[in-house]
Image (cartoon, rainbow, N blue to C red):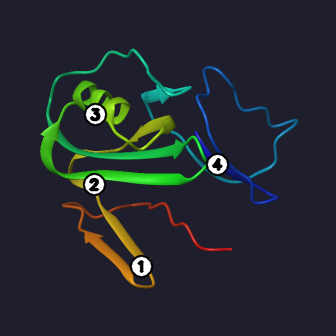
Amino acid sequence: MLSVDTRGTLSLRSLRQQPYNPNSEQLEQATQSVPMLMLAGKRTQFNADASQTRRSVVAMDKQGHLLFIVSPNQVFSLDELADQLVSSDLSIEVALNLDGGSSTGLYVNGGSSHVAIDSLAKLPLVIIVKAR
């Protein structure tokens, strides 16, 4: 689950390892997906078909930076993607697969940095990250 609590604290975690507790957590926003691709800097094991399609991932590196990773071309199965993330130089601590395929897209407007990868389908929801 990717979440932001009422204090603005960001969290990316496995709900299997850390279930949501409505009695002790006050979330402002959250989204869930499967599978977790990495936990504690290591690849997880999961059952997934071998289809290759566009992929979307939200990850957090060991320094606490939030990363959004997309593959706009049909090049990865989930297993291949998890292997690529582990072998990358991104120092990923935790990574969550998001809905991929035709809904994969990314738009970044970071001042001088601009990236636009259009989704192939209209999206009913998006994740928006704004500077504090």
Q: Secondary structure at mark 2?
A: helix
The secondary element bearing badge 4 is classed as strand
Residue contact at pointers 2 and 4, CB within 8 angstroms: no
**Quadrant location of residue 79?**
top left
Q: Which residue is mark 3?
A: 84
Mark 2 or mark 4: name the one nearer the start of the chain.
Answer: 4
Q: Nearer the viewer, mark 3 or mark 1?
A: 3
Is residue 107 found left or right of 49 in the rendered image? right
Q: CA gap, disc 4 to disc 3?
A: 25 Å
The residue closer to the viewer here, 74 or 121, is 74
10 Å crowding of disc 1: few (<14), some (14-19), many (20+):
few
Q: CA distance from mark 1 to mark 2?
A: 19 Å
Residue 38 image offset from top left, x and y in percent = 46, 28
Residue underneath mark 1:
109
Residue carrying label 2:
103
Which residue is under mark 4?
3
Q: Position of residue 55 (x, y in %)?
A: 27, 44
Disc nearer the start of the sequence (3/1): 3
Tell me the CA gap for discs 3 and 1: 26 Å
The residue type indicated by label 4 comes to: Ser
Secondary element at tag 3: helix
* Left or right: residue 33 compared with residue 71: right
Answer yes or no: do the residues labelled 1 and 4 have beta carbons within 8 Å?
A: no
Out of 79 and 86, give the one closest to the viewer.
86
Q: Nearest the camera: 95 or 3?
A: 95
Q: In the displayed structure, would residue 32 be above or below residue 78?
A: below
Kind of residue at badge 3: Gln
Mark closest to the chain's N terminus, 1 or 4: 4
**x and y percentages locating residue 34 in the rendered image:** 43, 31
Residue 114 lies, in percent from the top left, at 34, 78
The residue at the point 51 percent across, 28 percent down is 41
Q: Earlier in the sequence, mark 1 or mark 2?
A: 2
